[in-house]
Amino acid sequence: MTKVNEFLAKKSIHYDKIDRFVAFKMFEKYKDKIALKPIIHIVGTNGKGSTGRFLAQLLENLSFKVGHYTSPHILSFNERFYLKGEIASDELLDFAHDELKSIFKEDLEKISYFEYATFLAAVLFRDCDFIIFEAGLGGEYDATSVFEKKLSIFTRIGYDHIQILGSSLKEIARTKLKVMAKMAIISSEQEELVLKLAKKIALLKGADLKFSKAFEDENLNKEFENYALNFALPQFLKHNLMLALNACLFLTSKEQSLKALKELKNLNLAGRCQKIGENLFIDVGHNEMAALALKEYFKEKKITLVYNSYLDKEIFKILQILKPIIDTIQIYRYSNEDRKPANDLIFGIAKELNIQCGVFKRINPKEITLVFGSFILVENFLKEYCDKR
């Protein structure tokens, strides 16, 4: 077992509430020893991972050394740390762990799973030209928000984690937008309430807030559309690439951004409407916004939905959104020590929505199948699926 995994074995990945003051106190105490460059901070409800990875890949195409910290992971903790074009190795993470331990000493035991991962990324990416940190939850309550920011990027904001962030869209948006840096870009595809609040917070903070939009430059716009067509991007990934490219324009220049886009390869991030078989797709989305994106992607088709979810998610609303594309639901049973999956509750919801529902047994290669509901579900499915193959 690696030193990192040995440490993580003592920590729970889940939490009922966040104590931001722990991360803040640790950062204030040790920031001189971490000496991290100002970060690019990505905050929002959906699209953070793909927006950050698109931006990382664009900047790498310009020969910059880039670190991208994202969460959660699917199969391996290492997936959270993308450095110089690849997932960080066990050796690199153990080296960063030793450095972090030498800095924090006995205080290392006081921090949570996510706080540890965040400070580990800070050590790992110390020498990068650009550092991209994805907020794990919210904004002001998140460990990533303690670092000095070069640029804030706000993806689409919607309902999620209402037990922690608030029960209204305004409360959730305020929590996320309050961490706005002096320079910020926001997805223009937002509820009007969110856009108005963003403008208000920008005014109060004296921030230069820009809105992600189509490109005025003809060459850049043509290259963008060609890329989206060549890689068959679903609409939500096309939207996230546009946001990343707008950020690249801000950080570099029009000429460099065009060069970076021309050399851009396929998105190097698993689980985002990813096709892993002829008719088999996986998606780690787990909220209403993700369901709407998938409904659009599979419109006019009927799919088998391999599904499960935690009890704290809006299962009824999610399945109601997906109903027009669902042929049958197959419940993928899995267990988790920290949070209970819905399992049998889904049968009742499916009956109420008049959707055929059963327990997952096997994949029918002739049917379009989508595995969707959470990172944990996709992780368990992939382990079983890969073992069988």
Image (cartoon, grey):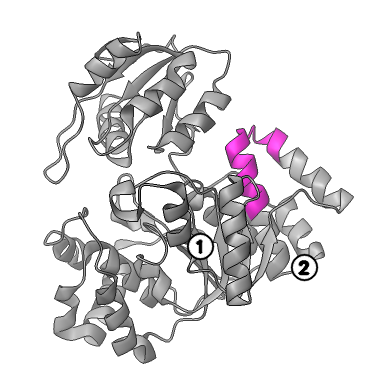
Looking at the picture, does residue 46 appear above or below residue 289?
A: below
Q: Can residue 54 be seen in this view?
A: no
Q: State the residue at coordinates (64%, 41%).
A: 238
Query: Quadrant of the image for the N terminus?
Result: bottom left
Looking at the picture, does residue 209 appear above or below residue 99?
A: above
Residue reaching furthest to the bottom:
32
**Which amino acid, by three-letter code, is at mark 2?**
Ser
**Which amino acid, by three-letter code, is at mark 1?**
Leu
Q: State the residue at coordinates (64%, 58%).
A: 58
- Pointer 2 and pointer 1: residues touching (CB < 8 Å)? no
Residue hosting label 2:
253
**Which of the pair 245/168 is nearer the observer?**
168
Label 2 neighbourhood size at 10 Å, few (<14), some (14-19), many (20+)?
few
Q: State the residue at coordinates (54%, 48%).
A: 156
Chief SS of the magenta region: helix
The x, y position of residue 83, in whole percent, is: 47, 64
Q: Is residue 235 magenta?
A: yes
Task: Specify the label residue 142 is tagged with.
Answer: none
Q: Circle 2 — which element? A: loop
The stretch of residues the image draws in magenta is 228-243
Residue hosting label 1:
177
